[in-house]
Image: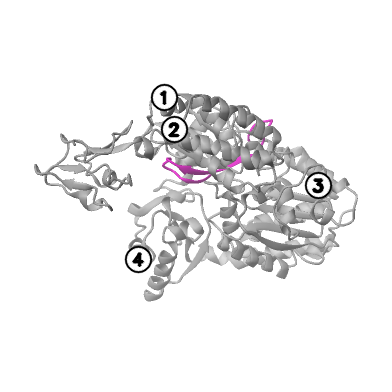
Amino acid sequence: MSVLGTDTQKTYQELKDQAVQAVEGLNTKSYVLVGTATCGRAAGALNVLETFRSEIGKHNVDAEIIEVGCMGHCYAEPMVIVYKPGFPKICYGSVDEGIATRLVTDFLVNDDPCFDFAMAALEPNDFFPTFEDFPRGVYEQKVVLSDCGLIAPDDIEQYIARDGYGGLAKALSKEPERVITEVKDSNLRGRGGAGFPTGVKWEICRNAEGDTKYVICNADEGDPGAFIDRALLESNPHQLIEGLAIAAYAIGASQGYIYVRAEYPLAIERLKTAIGQAREKGIIGNSVMGSNFSFDIKIFQGSGAFVCGEETALIASIEGNAGIPNHRPPFPAVSGLHGKPTIINNVKTLSYITHIIRNGAEWFKSIGTPGTPGTAVFALAGKVVGTGLVEVPMGTTIRTLIYDVADGIKNEKNFKAVQIGGPSGGCLPESSLDLPIDFDSLQQAGAMMGSGGLVVLDEEDCMVEIARFFLEFTQNESCGKCTFCRLGTKQMLDILTDITKGKGKLEDIDLLLELAVDIKAGSLCALGKTAPNPVLTTIRFFRDEYEAHITEGRCPALMCKELITYVIDEKKCSKLCDACIGSCPVEAVYTRSDMLKDIYLDKCVKCDNCLVTCLPLYQAVIKVSPPIEAGGNQNG
């Protein structure tokens, strides 16, 4: 039986009308949106924010300053959007205090939009390109990122005015089973890594015995290079709250939890504010929107254990126990938190829910591929120009993502590999660039969608060291319960460390493969089962690098410190330049009697300072491998 009656529909419409009225005044006056998510703050956004406040006050400008989240263009932070009646909304990138001052004095005061600092406009106009004109805009299709960076995360009115909580209102007008059917029909697969059909999980929980049920949002994002969940929580927390409430209604839960790591203080702060505002509006709490459905949310702060991203470990953590995985079955959907049926979904998964309910399953399936509909959200990191968040239709190729959306490799270096899926994913080579991005294609290639981390590697990255780095992370994060995971990953890590130091043996490669098979088969949870993936894919696609380290004592990428030496090319060195000497922290670089520079190899700590500071005009400092035996200096 539907819980949403005429009064509740009226309640939501009243909320919507109030919200529209509250925000419509923004379009009649000037305003400045300053991105103050973590990425913006790291780049100096808070200083920019204070500059705008100071300058607007100094010039007595009638303009509102609003803190927003992340638009995804992290490479261009701090980002600012300025609107003045009569002009389009213009986005500016890499804004500092000086540019902020100019935007107030030249634009808000004197009508000069300062196009030299502008990136794009946010709406069609006759004199400046929009983001849709950029290659990135052509390929992206934003769903869960659509409001990020455009609304204040601490202002529920702005969210409601853009149809926020309309999905919840629509869900409440249906039987819970029909909501589940809609999600099943959309073929939404969990975006936390495993890709299990969301609607199927909900149905299992709905049909499980028990009057008390729980919904949990897994926001324990711990993959190196992944920051999607954090950005969503900091930019649009109400989207998650709405999705969580819909999930609760569908399965029959009255209590929800958001499990978020304590290392995300800004996300937690904005979540608390959003939950409080939703309670005040009657959107969560007793009698949601005047219905007979009641639901509330608690925030649980995790301590940063990567293994708590696994469902049973996360539940154990909430219950006050050590975050250690348990055997399944029973699965949490049947017996989870406090032994009650429990649904656990990722931040991205729940963020899609409101859009699916609002627009319908067929709309969602019109995006992406038949097997994996919808969009894929990635955190682009590493050696790529356009770092940040991107959202593209499923089926987009890796090549398109890296070269068209993210503008290619930094410093015109050659692409080497891409690590997809975090420490549990795999490293795919150049031959995989035309692979379509979806759950099945990536899994067949030896990688996985994971939580959306995507690290781009170039010619200067050693694939043996990359495998060692990711395995070290998972080995350190192992809870220790499984012998295969606890000891097997340690043994693999020791072998990889020896290889990067030139101490490996050819038979070590086969031993790594043998250990990987055993660890995947014998580990209890996905952390152990997927830990060998980076090793397996780097051996599969870059075996020649392993062999070079072992048989030649050489690191082809010149990355492994034990296998390289820094030397100075006499033919390129200038007698007039002392940059390398001043940069050395251990005084290993010195001036010879002929005024050219040289390096005491036994003093050199291989810190890269001399290489970085050597003027481009000369580029005299180079790395060589195999290493030169340390003595007095290179010319000894």
Percent position of residue 263, x then y: 57, 59
Per the image, is 369 magenta? yes
| Secondary structure beneath label 2 | loop
Q: Amino acid at mark 3?
A: Ala
In the rendered image, which residue does mark 3 sit on? 333
User: Which is in the foreground here, disc 1 or disc 2?
Assistant: 2
Residue to which mark 1 is pinned: 551
Q: Tell me which numbered mark, 1 or 2, is placed earlier along the sequence.
A: 2
The residue drawn where x is 52% and y is 34% is 495
Q: Which mark is residue 503?
A: 2
Mark toward the viewer: 4 or 2: 2
The vertical placement of 544 against 321, above or below, is above
Relative vertical location of residue 255 with respect to residue 180 in this rendering, above or below: below
Q: Which residues are magenta?
A: 368-391
Q: Earlier in the sequence, mark 1 or mark 3?
A: 3
Local secondary structure at mark 3: loop
Expressed as whole percent of the image width and height from the top left, the position of residue 187 reads: 73, 37
